[in-house]
Image (tube, helix red, strand yellow):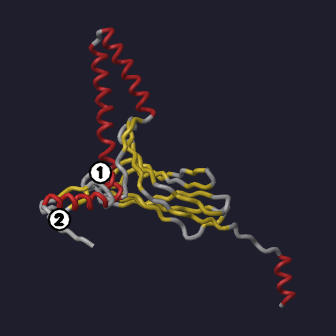
Amino acid sequence: VQTCALPISRANVRSSNQARLQSVPRVHKGPTSKGRRGRIRPIVTPSNHSRRRGSSALDRRFSREGVLYLGILVVLLFSAMTSGINLLMLIFGMLLGALVVNWLLVRPVLRGATVRRHLPGSVFAGEPFAVEVDLWNKNRFLSNWSISVQDCIRRDKKTLRPAVWFPRVAAGDRRSGVYRGVLWRRGRYELGALKLSTGFPLGLARAVTDQPGKESLIVYPRPGKLMGRWSQGWEDLD
């Protein structure tokens, strides 16, 4: 057996190390960045940040009344431009200002609201039950006005959407509301996310947000009553 020693240069060592590194599969868990000391840190994107907090962003949209209001504004603007009447243009500006104010206020009114439900201990088919909903206002200065909390109860592709309305919750305060209902079939019902919305002050625009609240509600069979014959039978056995 003949052996020979080959000189190993630094370039060969680097190329071999790079080949080893390239042969090892890399697992990317997410975007990363290097800090000051060269440490790898994960980059928190807005979507990941919102998932960690467990709440979705506030969505803002026009209501049905707001869409009709926009149609009236378009007609009024067209009439003012074609007729040249300054009074119509003045009325258009005032109505447009009200729409803009409503569009800007709906988000601050709903921001800081946190909701939680409390399910009853036992629910029976065919008997009324009550679910308590608590609303906290975490704002320091602003109050929450005219907030509607809509629940979601699902079973067998059928959905029920009961709602609780809170006229006003002061800054740093908490209010409780109750909705009642009757479920006629026994079994397991799934409760989804709670939907918060408000159209304060004019109802032309609405701010909507969903807060996680998935739970299960088990409805037991309706309790029955024993007839008189059963009681007589038990007495005879005794």
Picture residue at 45% right of the left edge, 59% below the top: 213
Q: Is residue 31 left or right of residue 210?
A: left
Q: Which residue is mark 2?
A: 6
Dividing the picture into quadrants, the one containing residue 78 is: top left
Q: Crowding near pointer 2: few (<14 within 10 Å), some, many (20+)?
A: few
Picture residue at 57% right of the left edge, 51% below the top: 160
Q: Look at label 2 and name its amino acid.
A: Leu
Across and down, in percent, residue 140 comes to 25, 56
Above or below, comparing residue 105 to residue 215 in the picture: above
Residue nearest the observer in this picture, 228 or 11: 11
Q: Is residue 84 left or right of residue 56?
A: left
Q: Look at label 1 and name its amino acid.
A: Pro
Across and down, in percent, residue 87 comes to 29, 16
- In this view, the residue farthest toward the top is 83
Dividing the picture into quadrants, the one containing residue 99 is: top left
Q: Marks 2 and 1: which is nearer the front? A: 2
Above or below, comparing residue 142 to residue 23 in the picture: above
Q: Which residue is mark 1?
A: 46
- Give the secondary structure at mark 1: helix
